[in-house]
Image: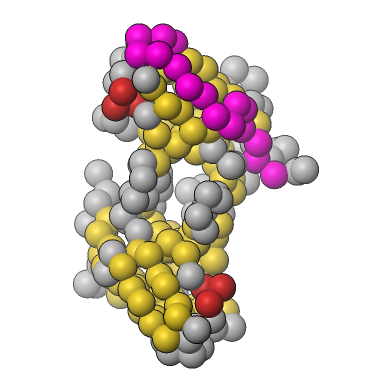
Amino acid sequence: GENVEQHPSTLSVQEGDSAVIKCTYSDSASNYFPWYKQELGKRPQLIIDIRSNVGEKKDQRIAVTLNKTAKHFSLHITETQPEDSAVYFCAATPEDMRFGAGTRLTVKP
Amino acid sequence: DTGVSQNPRHKITKRGQNVTFRCDPISEHNRLYWYRQTLGQGPEFLTYFQNEAQLEKSRLLSDRFSAERPKGSFSTLEIQRTEQGDSAMYLCASSQGLLAYNEQFFGPGTRLTVL
């Protein structure tokens, strides 16, 4: 089955800096790679996703890149704000969704 | 509220008791997923349904766990003879369509505590 690894587990940045979170996956059949944000005590919410036929996708301050050959994908957040502080999960799915262990992002004002 | 709902939100039970959770997906969503999330970890896939058919079960889902979606709408997850290791947040998610690469919308979860 699919195995997703996520790094780093914690990330602290100054407000305005960029943050990058990286994930690798094992199943070459995976074709959908969403990123979820989970604030404390709340449900995971999708922030951006990418399908395997696309190498990069951007939505305002958030971008995701995908390298299918190397089986890794990354989340990039630019101009970070304190409200970006949360746990971020990557996931990969050939059919069912497998999540990474999460990255706790702290943005210091 | 037209989002995914789960009941109860919290459940405290004694070891050995049976518990049942309910998930109501977004109307007309074909797929319904169950996950388990422990503190500091990502959601772990348990099982999913496409309409009323249960298509896959994780090896995490021991024979004490059973899930149903009898009419292709709401779903129930039952845990028999609960153990302390079952303590976790149980999340339900639903998505529209018959393909895996559609956004999953999560419910608020049911937090289970086994004493």
Picture quarter containing residue B75?
top right
Spot occupied by residue A91 in the image (x, y as percentages of width and height):
38, 57
As rendered, which of A30 and A44 lies closer to the eye? A44
Q: Residue at x 50, y 62 (%)?
A: A37
Q: Is residue A6 left or right of residue B77?
A: left
Q: Along the line of sight, which residue is nearer the eye, A101 or A91?
A: A101
Query: Can residue A90 be seen in this snapshot?
Result: no
Counting from the top left corner in percent of width and height, residue A13 is at 38, 82
Q: Quadrant of the N terminus of chain B?
A: top right
Q: How many marks?
A: 0
Which x, y percent locates residue B57?
A: 36, 29
Rendered image quadrant of residue A12: bottom left
Rendered residue at 52%/24% (across/down): B11
Which quarter of the figure is the C terminus of chain B placed in?
top left
Q: Taking A20 as reference, is B12 above or below it?
A: above
Does the image show residue B95? yes
Q: Residue A42 location, x and y as percent?
A: 55, 51
* Residue B45 versus residue B8 in the image, above or below: below
Its colouring scheme is: secondary structure
Q: Which residues are magenta?
A: B3-18
Q: Residue at x 42, y 63 (%)?
A: A88
- Closer-to-camera residue (B83/A72): B83
Q: Residue at x 53, y 32 (%)?
A: B110
